[in-house]
Each structure stands twice: as C-alpha cells, then as structure tokens.
Amino acid sequence: MKKQNLVANYTKMKNKKGQLQIQEMAFMLVAVLFFFVLVGLFVASIMYSNLHEDATQIAETRTLTSVTNLADSPEFSCVLSKSNCVDEDKLISLINKTSYINFWTFSSLKVVTFSAFNKNENEMIKCTRANYPECELFLVYDKNVSNERAISSYVALCRKEYENGYTYDKCELARLVAGTELKT
Amino acid sequence: MIKQNKRGQQEILGFVLIVLLVTIMGVVFLSFSIGKSRPTKQTSAEISNLLEASMYHTTKCAVNYVPQYREVQDLIKECYNHPEQMCLNGQGVCDVLKSQLKELIDQSLTVSDVSPNKAYTLKIQYNSLDSLNETTEVLFFEEGIFKNCSSKPGGSHSIAVTLSSGTIDTELEVCRGEI
C-alpha cells in the first residue's frame, strides 16, 4: 500500500514538472514571437518611410518631366532643333489668350527670365506686347487657386534679334514655372 | 534529478544562442538595407536641365563678326580646340566661358549657408573614345564647401567633338543640406 502511494506521488511530481516545462516553453515561445513582431514592425516602418520618400520623389520627377515636355510642345518649342527650348516670340503671343487656360492641366504657367532669377514676383517687370523684350516675367495664365504648389524647370529662352543688318538667335537661361493645385 | 536539470540548462543555453544569432543576422541585414537606400550621388533632372539650357545661352563673345555671338557650348569647343582664341572684344574665349558659366550657375543655384544649396562643383573635360585613359580638363570651378551634404544631386551634358573622336563632358554636382 505504502509502495503504491509512493509510486502515485512520484508520478504526480513528474507530471507537475512536465507541466512546468511546458509552461516555460510556452512563455518562451510568446516572448520570441513578441520579439519577432517588434523586429517586423521596425523593418516595416523603415520600408514604409522609404516607400513614402520614393513616392514623393517619383511624383516630383513626373511633374518635372511634364514641365520639361511642355517646353518641347509645339506651342512653346523653338524653331531651331534644340530640345528644352522655349520660343520667346511664341510666348509673347500666348499672353492674354484665354483659350489656353483650360488647355493645360496646370493651375498657373509662367516663364521667368535669367535677369529676374533672384527677384520677388512683385519686383519683376511683367511682359506685355508693349514692353517686349525688355521685361522679366511672362505670365501665360494664372487661375489664382489658393492651394498651389509650383514646380520649375530650367529652359533656354530664344528669340530673333537684329544687329548690323543680320538676324541671329539670342538665347538665355530661363525658368519655366508650372503650378499644380493641391487637392485636400 | 541533477542530470535532468543539466539537460534543461543546456537546452536554454542553446535556445539563447539561436536567438542571439538570429538577432545579429537581423541587425546586419537591416544595416545593409538602410545603407543601400542612401546613395551618395544622384542624377537629377533639374540639374541636367540647367546644364542643357545653359549650353544654349548666347554669350557676348563673337569670334568672326558681330553679331555671330557664340553660345556657351560653342565656347566650350573653342576653349578645348583653340584655348588661345580671342573674342572680337579682346577677351579670351576660355575667360568668357568661365565667367559666363559661373554667372549662370551662381544665379540659378544661389549657394549660401541659409539656402538649401551649400556648394557645387563644375567640371568640363574631354574624353577620348579611342583610349579610355585620355582625358583632358577644359575647365573646373567650384563654390562653397562640400560638407554635411544630405544629398548630392548631379547632372551631365555631352558635346560631340567633330575634329576628333571624343566628347566633351560637363558635370555639375550640387551639395544639398538642411537650412
């Protein structure tokens, strides 16, 4: 009888120890799982931040490309075989033409000449048919939207000049500025 | 009983070792992936456009007659082929090229401590297509100090040289930092 009790107690103790081991293992598994979840979250946050950065960069490049393509469009491009070149004589004829306001997807479109690169917009001499080419800002159109982001691209601005009985092409560096309305 | 305890301790030690190994591998992998995502040199469409448009800028240098004024790209070729050539106004073609290009880049990028552009370097060199080693520097100038740059956008423009089989490459690199 005594022997039987001893065997039963021994079996109970062994079972308890086994349970304890299983419990330890379970806790350990939970801890490991928690650790990997934390690492996963850390990696995901880094990847997401890079993705966000990449998306912004791609969006900016796309807008910049569309502005560059705009310079090569028939409405702006130079007669000379030059890429990324805006014809100043075409540009002056586009000013105050209301039919072009809805032609391009941009909310505003302007060209700033080299002499006005470091000036504020209100300091620049606006181009009209009367003062052309002695001016600094070609305002093609402006829809006057409240929430606007401007993207600019450098272009060559060329026009015909007359000197000593010859005509020649005079080009200067300029900035083509296109505004896009930010949707909230 | 002691034997069983020892076995348990060994298991725990093994497990801790595995966890440590996985953690170290993870950290190494992460440092590699983060390091790769920050390239030191980037090609920028904005800088490339600036260089391309600058090449068409008409200078005040006429070599044969007025008003046959040379563009910046013509002066680059002239400066490489005939560095002693003078403009009709008495200035050397290389001097006009340097002053004109510097003015264009300075006005466009506005390098200062309070602007995002901290510094830039402009390098113009002839690269022969016949031999890989033959490079001749045509012009080099810089503005500001390349220090603590958060990004280094750059662009290049190539001009074919008709007299020899090679190209004259213009490279512009900008140091951008926090304002």
Image: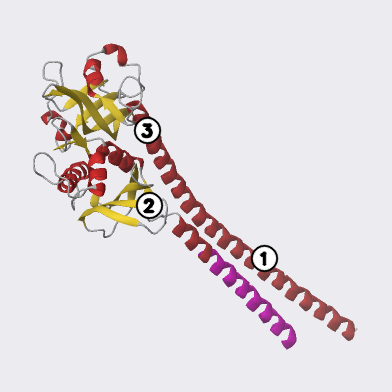
Left/right placement of residue A41 relative to residue B95 reads right
Q: Is residue B12 magenta?
A: yes
Residue at x-position 35% and y-position 34%: A64
* Disc ID at residue A63: 3
Helix, strand or loop at mark 2: strand
Q: Dot 2: within a 10 Å radius of its alpha carbon, few (fewer than 14), some, or many (20 or more) residues? A: some
The residue where tag 2 is placed is B128
Q: Which amino acid does the dot numbered 3 rest on?
A: Thr
How far apart are labels 1 and 2 at the CA level? 70 Å
Q: Give the image location of residue B12, x and y in percent.
A: 65, 76
Q: Is residue A110 magenta?
A: no
The residue where tag 1 is placed is A26
Return the residue nearer the eye: B85 or B52. Answer: B85
Q: Which amino acid does the dot numbered 1 rest on?
A: Ala
Q: Main secondary structure of the magenta part?
A: helix
Q: Dot 1: within a 10 Å radius of its alpha carbon, few (fewer than 14), some, or many (20 or more) residues? A: few
Which chain is home to disc 3? A
Helix, strand or loop at mark 3: helix
- The range drawn in magenta is B1-27
Q: Which amino acid does the dot numbered 2 rest on?
A: Ser
Q: Nearer the viewer, mark 1 or mark 3?
A: 3
Quadrant of the rendering where the N terminus of chain A is positioned: bottom right
